[in-house]
Amino acid sequence: MAQLSRYPVAEPPTAPEREKTGHLLLRAYAVLVVFSALAHSFWYNLIGLAGAAVLLGVITLATLAIWIPRLASSRRAERFPWRRLPWVTLGYVAFAALSIAWSAWPAVSVVTWLLLASVTLQGLFLADVLTWRELVRCLEIALRWVVGLSVALELWVSAVLRHPLLPNFSEAPEDPDPHWYWVRGNLLDGLLGGGRLQGAVGNSNLLGILCLLALVVFALRLADRAPSPAMRWIWTVVAAYLFVRAGSATALVAVVAVVGVLAAAVLMRRAERPDERSRLYALFTAIAAAGIVLVLVARDRLLELVGREGDLTGREGIWGAVFERAIERPVAGNGFASPWLPWDPAFDRWIVDHGITVFHAHNMWLDVFLQLGGVGVVLVAGAFAALVWRSWFFAVDRPRWDIRADRPYQAVALLPTLVVTMLLVQGLTESGPIMLWGWLLVTMLAFKIKSAPLVDVGAAEASAPERRAPRSRRR
């Protein structure tokens, strides 16, 4: 006969799984890496070219010191997925290195290729050591720093300093061009109608596109029901305000594209049958074609609506000069140089805008054509095409690895396709997607999608070596 007892027969409770201090420090370091890439111009304006170069070198060496032991560790949940590396993306990096042999500016090619290699290394590192949710969280924290520092610096210059601020806190010469300033101090000019803001990054166009990226990441975190939604809404409002005050036409067009792709992805997720998806693809194709025709027909009117001139604020003149030089060596190009180094004779005073030597072509495709010719354009097109293809189906296909076909979609899965949409639009008027933070995102997302095609599933998403196992209680 069973005896009445006060002692339960169930398994005793265990403490929840906890992360090791090492993994918490790793995530903090990842935030520093991402912030330094996103706000590279902040470091340049704060500590100068030499200081920024030293910081880049230290971060690169630190990444190698952290990553190499992890690659060689026997505690990895699985071997490093060499076969799943983004080989087309790495092929572009390799061809850029080869271009040093025939470069018209070899010193520039060596220096800028080292920068490209460092950024590529960081992208692969982040994709390998962090899970999908950790990547999004890392981006969120880094973007909060960008947004927060931008507000703080703009407020300090406007309310305390009361005059524009030059890079490295230099003294302003007589009658300087406004484009020379790090921050112009326009924050308190008006709520929405004042001058454009430059933020901590010192560039309105860069601030605008980073605020758009922040809005995307914050929205995905809200959709994922992450903790502290009220605080996240506050950050969203601040990022939206900075986006409006930055006044970037490129970022505004990118918003339209991102919203369109987001709507398309949501509709595709709701399609239950293949024929429904086929009809949606036909609809999307028709809308895209109509949009292209509208842009071509009403180009001047659209530029007027966004407050831009017919020559795209001088970009057409830049494109013409770049194409004239690029066509001289159309196959393999003149040698890698992203960004252009303005102190090199090949670029010094070559193209000048507002008294400043231009350091990129303001179009990523034209920039690649100048540097690496048609071969480079094919490689970059292949890298972006592969990322677009994988990111789209990563976003619209239901998570599935067995016969079960009703698992819920993940909000995090929308990140790659929205980011690559933003980068492709930005690449029409800027060269950011092929260097620094843009290339870091391309490399990181391309590798992560291949190595972890499902969110929260598989050894690549487990972070098992870095998590503290739950303690068992003695009975």
Image (cartoon, rainbow, N blue to C red):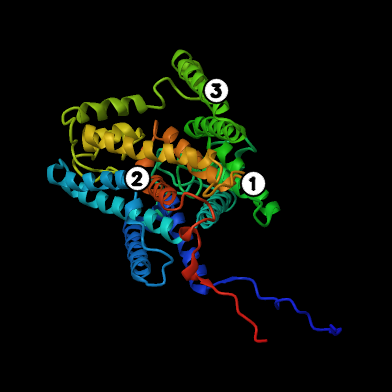
**Residue 223 has which mark?**
1
**Residue 435 has which mark?**
2
Mark 1 element type: helix
User: Could you tell whether 57 is left or right of 27 in the image?
Assistant: left
Q: Is residue 123 visible?
A: yes
User: Foreground residue, 349 or 338?
Assistant: 338
Mark 3 vs mark 1, foreground winner is: 3
Which quarter of the image is occupied by the C terminus?
A: bottom right
Circle 3 crowding by C-alpha within 10 Å: few under 14, some 14–19, many from 20: few
Cα–Cα span, label 3 and label 1: 27 Å
Residue type at mark 2 is Met
Mark 3 element type: helix
Residue 264 position in % (x across, y down) = 56, 31
Which quarter of the image is occupied by the N terminus?
A: bottom right
User: Could you tell whether 111 is left or right of 20 in the image?
Assistant: left
The quarter of the picture where residue 226 lies is bottom right
Pointer 3: what residue?
Answer: 279
User: Could you tell whether 263 is left or right of 374 in the image?
Assistant: right
Residue 116 position in % (x across, y down) = 30, 50
Residue type at mark 3 is Arg
Q: Is residue 109 above or below residue 321?
A: below
User: Could you tell whether 64 is left or right of 350 in the image?
Assistant: right
The quarter of the picture where residue 428 lies is top left
User: Foreground residue, 212 or 130?
Assistant: 130
